[in-house]
Image: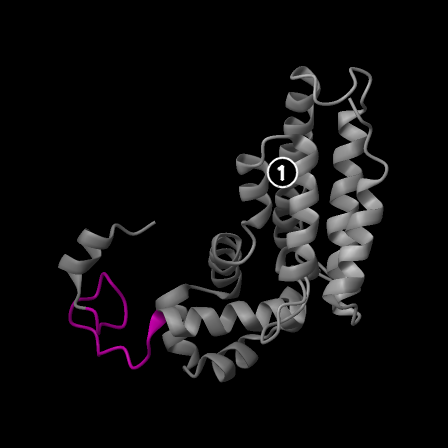
Amino acid sequence: MVNRQTAGRQAGPGSEAGPRGRGRPRSFDRETALEKAILAFWEHGYEATSVSGLTEVMGIGAPSLYAAFGDKRSLFEEVVNVYGTRYGSFGDRALAEEATARAAVERMLREAAAEYTEPGRPRGCLVIHAATNCTSPEVEGSLRERRNANIAAIESRIRAGVAAGELPADTDAAAMARHTGAMVQGMSQQARDGAGKEQLEALAELAMRIWPRS
């Protein structure tokens, strides 16, 4: 990661690349271009999003893309990180902020229903959809690790709930976490297929009925 202060000393805000202080002025706003790349990968997935397609939607030439973001895979890694902070952090917030594991998962599913159908942007989850038909083992593996890390976080929260007496001692935390992950992934695909917010909220309500009571 480039240190902002160091980058600032190396080049002004209009430079093509940080280390080259004498490079020609950058003719685009990096954050705007990055947001357009997020939307492109979110809509089409990793494999179907070409460099030429990216340069078109981002409004820049290939040399500028490579200078500012690196190659397609490097750009995608940045896209996924920013997406996780900007659009995909609702699950982490739910796990951290809710008083019980049950409340955290219920909030996660309900917010997924809202986030995955939000008007004005692609439906579903970028991390889930981008892996579709992906032929890059590195990219597919990275996305799988993210999904599995999410499930592991849910399992950890459920185990904490069992330890606190919120849930019965014989609760299968791993299976409950897998079920939640399957629901989130399924809701993403359902949203891609046209399901609306209310329909996904109904799925969330059904999913919570299997949860044991303490």
Q: Tell me which corner region of the image, top left, top right, bottom left or bottom right, holds residue 18.
A: bottom left
Q: Residue at x 79, y 68 (%)?
A: 195
Q: Residue at x 66, y 37 (%)?
A: 103
Membership of 22 in magenta stretch:
yes
In the image, residue 153 above or below residue 59: above
Q: Tell me which corner region of the image, top left, top right, bottom left or bottom right, holds residue 11.
A: bottom left
Q: Does residue 122 appear to the left or right of 33 in the view shown?
A: right
Q: Position of residue 179 (x, y in %)?
A: 80, 40
Badge 1 element: helix
Membership of 182 in magenta stretch:
no
Q: Residue at x 57, y 73 (%)?
A: 40
Which coloring applies here? one colour
Q: Residue at x 34, y 49 (%)?
A: 1
Q: Position of residue 48 (x, y in %)?
A: 67, 72
In the image, residue 178 above or below residue 212: below
In the image, residue 153 above or below residue 10: above
Secondary structure mostly seen in the magenta stretch: loop
Q: Position of residue 100 (x, y in %)?
A: 64, 30
Magenta stretch: give its range. Answer: 13-30
Q: What residue type is disc 1 on?
A: Ala
Q: Nearer the viewer, residue 159 or 129?
A: 159
Q: Nearer the viewer, residue 129 or 184?
A: 184
Q: Does residue 24 appear to the left or right of 129 in the view shown?
A: left
Q: Tell me which corner region of the image, top left, top right, bottom left or bottom right, holds residue 199.
A: bottom right
User: How many labels, in total?
Assistant: 1
Q: Quadrant of the C terminus?
A: top right
Mark 1 highlights which residue? 149
Q: Which class describes the residues within 10 Å of circle 1: few (<14), some (14-19), or many (20+)? A: few
